[in-house]
Amino acid sequence: MVKQEIVMSGIRPTGFLHLGNYFGAVRNYVRMQDEYNCFFMVADLHSLTTHPDTKELRANVRRVIAENIACGLNPDKVALYCQSHVYETGELYLFLNMLAYKGELEKTVTFKDKAKLQPDNVNAGLLTYPVLQTADIIIHRAQLVPVGKDQEQHLEMARNFVKRFNHRYGEVFPEPYAFNYGEDLARVPSLDGSGKMSKSENQMATVYLSDDDELIRKKIMKTKTDSGPTEKNSAKPDYIQNIFLLLQLFSKKDVLEKFENDYNNCSIRYGDMKKQLAEDVVAFVKPIRERTESILNDEKYMREVMEKGAEKATQSAKITMQLVRDAIGLKYY
Ligand code: TRP
C-alpha cells in the first residue's frame, strides 16, 4: 500500500554510480517506490555551482537516469526527473533566499569545503546551495528525504527555512527529515581499505556499475591481503574484515560461512576468496551494466522517461506554488 507521505531526494549527476551509491541510496529508493509517493531528481542545476562547463552534463544526466532505472527504479511508479525541468523550483528558491541569512550560509560545512576547493569561483549559487536544495524538497511538500549523513546539515537548514516561512506567511510546508528506514545504511568498504567506497581519486578502489567484468576482477584481485592468520580464531585486520563485508553483500551465505571457517582454522586461501568474490560481484554488476546500456541506446524511451518525470514533478510543483503565492500575499487585484 502506498502511504501518504512524500519522499524526495536528489541525485548528483556526477556520472557513473558505484557500489557505494547502490547500497547507500539506490537500493533504498527502489524499496521506497512501492511504499511512498516518491520524487527522485537529478540535481543538474546544483552541478552548475561547481561545474559551470556543461559539456559533460548531458552524458552524465542520461547515465545517472539510466543507471537508476537499471537498478530497479520504475519511472511509472516514481517521478524521476531533472531539476532544470521544473521551473517552479526557481521561483521558490527566490522566495526562500529572502529568508536565508548570509551568516548561516557561510557557516555551512559544504560551502566552506567547496569555497576552499575553488577559491576563484565562490559564486552566490555555491553560497545558497542549501536554499536551492530546500526548494527541491519542499516544492513537493516532502517530509522524508533519503540521504546520507553528509546531508544532515542541509536538512537542518531546510527545517529552519521552512519554520521561518511558515511563521511569517502561514503553514504551507511540513518540516523535512532524513529518512532511511531507521536502519544504518549498508556500508560498502573501499577496496584500498580506506573508509567507504566513494567516487575517489583511486579508481581501483571503487567498483562502478559501468565497469566491465575484467576490470571488476582486476580491482578485486588487487585488494590487499597477507599470508593469513597463524592463530585460530584470531581477530581480522581491517583490510581482511573489509573483504568479508563485501562477501556478506554479494555472496551466498554458505560461501561466507566457508571462508569464515577457513579463516578461523587458519586454512584460508585469500586468492580463492577473492576469486569467488570477484565472480559474485561480476554476477551482480553485469545485468545492471547491460540494462543501462540498452536503456541509454533507446533514445525514444529516454525522452519519454524525462518528459513523464518532468510532467509529474511540475504538476506537484504548480500546486505548491499556488499555495506559496497565496500565502505570501502577492495578489493585487
Ligand atoms: N545535495 C545533495 C548531494 O550532494 C543533492 C541534492 C540536491 C538533494 N537536491 C536535493 C538531496 C534534495 C536531497 C534532496 O547529494
Image: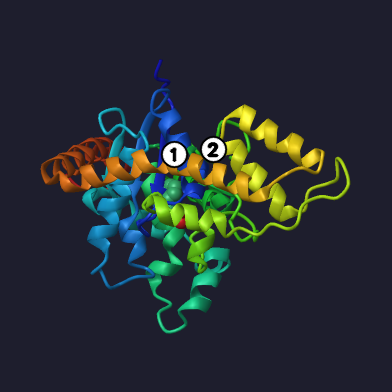
Q: Position of residue 35 (x, y in %)?
A: 43, 23
- Helix, strand or loop status at disc 2: helix
Q: Nearer the viewer, residue 191 or 156?
A: 191
The disc labelled 2 sits on which kind of residue? Phe
From this viewpoint, is residue 241 visible? Answer: yes
Q: What residue is pinned by disc 2?
A: 250
Res 284 label: 1
Q: Nearer the viewer, residue 231 or 59?
A: 231
Query: Is 313 above or below relative to 106?
Result: above
Seen as rendered, the residue at the extreme right is: 231
Q: Position of residue 210 (x, y in %)?
A: 36, 52
The disc labelled 1 sits on which kind of residue? Phe
Q: Could you tell me which residue is drawn at 22 percent across and 42 percent down?
A: 295
Label 2 CB-ligand 1 distance < 8 A: no
Residues packed near mark 1 inside 10 Å, few (<14), some (14 to 19) or many (20 plus): some
Do tag 2 and tag 1 residues touch (Cβ < 8 Å)? yes
- Count the marks: how many? 2
Q: Could you tell me which residue is drawn at 30 percent across and 31 percent down?
A: 74
Q: Could you tell me which residue is drawn at 59 percent across and 55 percent down?
A: 190
- Answer left or right for 92 relative to 270: left
- Helix, strand or loop status at disc 1: helix
